[in-house]
Image (cartoon, rainbow, N blue to C red):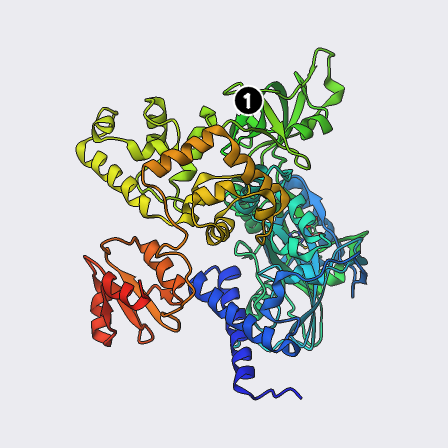
Amino acid sequence: MTDTTSPTRLRLEQLRDEIHFHNYRYHVLDTPVISDYEFDRLLAELRQIEAENPEWVTPDSPTQRVGSQPAARFDKVRHPGPILSLANAFSVQDVYAWNERITRIDERVAQADYVVEPKIDGLSVVLHYRNGIFILGATRGDGEVGEEVTTNLRTVRSVPLRLPVDPAGPPAPAYLVVRGEVFMNIADFDALNRRLEQAGEKAYLNPRNTAAGSLRQLDPALTASRPLNLLTYQIVSIDGQAPVTQWETLAFLRALGFPVSKEASHQPTLDAAMVEVQSWEFRRSSLPFEADGMVIKLNDLVLARDLGFVGKDPRGAIAFKFPAQEVTTKLLDIGVNVGRTGVLTPYAMLEPVDIGGVIVKQATLHNFDYIAEKDIRVGDRVRVKRAGEVIPYVIGPVVELRSGVESVYQPPTACPTCGEPVENLSGEVAWYCVNAACPAQLIRVLEHFVSRGAMDIVGLGIKIVEQLIDSGLVHDVADLYTLRREDLLALEGFAEKKADNLLAAIDASRGQSLARLVTALGVRGVGEVMAADLARFFPDLEALSRASLENLQTIEGVGPNTAQAIVDWFERPANRQVIGKLHTAGVWPQAVSPTEPVGEQPLAGMTFVITGTLPTLSRDQAKEYIQAHGGKVTDSVSKKTSYLVAGEAAGSKLAKAQELGVPVLDEAGLRKMGGN
Ligand code: IVH
């Protein structure tokens, strides 16, 4: 029998409440109160308890956001009421005409107030809650029957799994059905596409398609990996009294813990509403998501209901559509960029054109398959879209406007920068330049090598990288370690202090872990996590460079493609030379460095705060060190802090620790406690 009062069980409940709350602070309110690290610790503790007590796992547990078994198909769900659409207005006159029409039907409209909301370009979803627990989620479908995507929606961080999310909120109705929009923020969309392109996979066309495609995945784990978001705006059905105005509906949804658009506003008259709507036309690119217009809604929901609907469009609301950010122009030529991993990306060179106030000369063509699939020819008139901050892209050709002189594009067989032959891996759409000495790649390779998650060479930005390459001082990453003071002083903008600082930063990076060095090499498919796994498996770079395909694939997470990419990388003579040079230059970390995870966890259960400058470890390295030895690092000193690790120029944190009686360690003291 399950004991619901045992300390473990109580801890489990407490953890769930806390995690739901912090998740909400982060994903809905945008004001987290704990660090990601602390959040992960809470989640890990909950996972542990659930792993030991599987009978306690419930669908509303925050651990269930990861996505479970893939489904064979989606079930159908009948919505509790029609999920309506919206009529469109394309001009201010259209909106006033709408208002006059409905005033003729019901004179109460003459005194009406309004709510204005962004029209989020995503896909409509319907969420069901029984006694506050999220039990069912569906897509809109045809408005009457949708597809059941509960497990997928559970992976969306801003979908509340349990209401009210904040215990201080109003009690959840016995049954509640809410409607909202699932979408992807533009920045997340761009980042996802960059990742896909670098991994040689097909990029997505726009945030809306991506959100729709991600939600309608049969494998929820895939949905979980996509940065999807939710905003809610309507109560479809409720047990008990529903709010009688739209403005109160939004407040009620917010109070229960649903995400609600921050940009929604309450307007006393239609004139005021239209001023607001039009102001958004010019500010639309400041929205984090794509909006194709603003929705103007009668605030009085009783009046709106009484007005009824025309077809699938309720009379009580209208969508004011922003002008399309889409134009046609001439495709003058197709250029090709070479990325860090050597991936070749085609782009359109366009006859300059104004899209929403921005002159566009270039647009992405995603990949060579895309050009072929859409039959995009040089000389074509093409449709180009630019929405918000999304990089402009070519939608397709206007075939009717062809004159016959357009030419079919042939993808390059050689790298446009270095002239070496390009390669295509089976199963990938991308073509690669595999010459590590390719100058186009070298800039990106170096940029990545010195970046924060890799060798973390502070002060070595893109400008200096370019200078070093252009001046012929650096031909590969290993050359950084043989730079001399006089070499740098000969470069423009380098005074003694700058040169010395850079050399010191480069020198300090020799102490980085093997995991970071492996990340820094930038082998395709090998990110930070996999690099850390490889660094646990192989004692040094030499051992990794000799690893066989079979051997590599025994490591969890390393599939055949990545294993092949690793083997290929180390087989290339230029890369072998780089490894040899790194060795000679003393950039040769061993698997067990002080910052690597170690077997013993002498710091387990202790919480540390780091302040000031430590003699040998950077802030990040000290943090890694503590974590690798089982300790926890937080940002501020409190009574719960076990130790303050203080270096030179420690300030207010030191004072606070002394005030609270928190013991203070220096770096040597920390290493002593950690055992090395
Ligand atoms: S209200 C009766 N509000 O736009 C309620 N819809 O073109 C009708 N949409 O199907 C919908 N943001 O998927 C409403 N703030 C918003 C919206 C919104 C996006 C979508 C919704 C609808 C489509 C109509």
Q: Quadrant of the N terminus?
A: bottom right
Quarter-of-image position of residue 109: bottom right
Residue closer to the observer: 358 or 415: 415
Residue labelled 1 has its Cβ within 8 Å of some atom of ligand 1: no
Residue closer to the observer: 658 or 216: 658
Q: Residue at x 64, y 47 (%)?
A: 121
- Residue 613: where, in percent of width, then height? 23, 55
Q: Residue at x 23, y 39 (%)?
A: 501
Where 172 sits versus 438, above or below? below
- Residue 320: where, in percent of width, then height? 64, 45
Give the residue type at disc 1.
Answer: Cys
Q: Residue at x 22, y 59 (%)?
A: 647
Q: Quadrant of the C terminus?
A: bottom left
Quarter-of-image position of residue 580: top left
- Residue 375: where, in percent of width, then height? 72, 24
Residue 15 seen by the camera: yes
Where 618 sits versus 638, above or below? above
- Residue 73: where, in percent of width, then height? 80, 56
Secondary structure at badge 1 equals loop
Judge left or right: residue 190 versus residue 576.
right
Residue closer to the observer: 107 or 149: 149
The number of callouts visible is: 1
Number of residues whose C-alpha sits closer than 10 Å to that of mark 1, classed few (under 14), some (14–19) or many (20 or more): many
Residue assigned mark 1: 415
Where 472 sits versus 49, above or below? above
Residue 361 seen by the camera: no
Judge left or right: residue 613 versus residue 583.
left
Where 61 sits versus 380, above or below? below
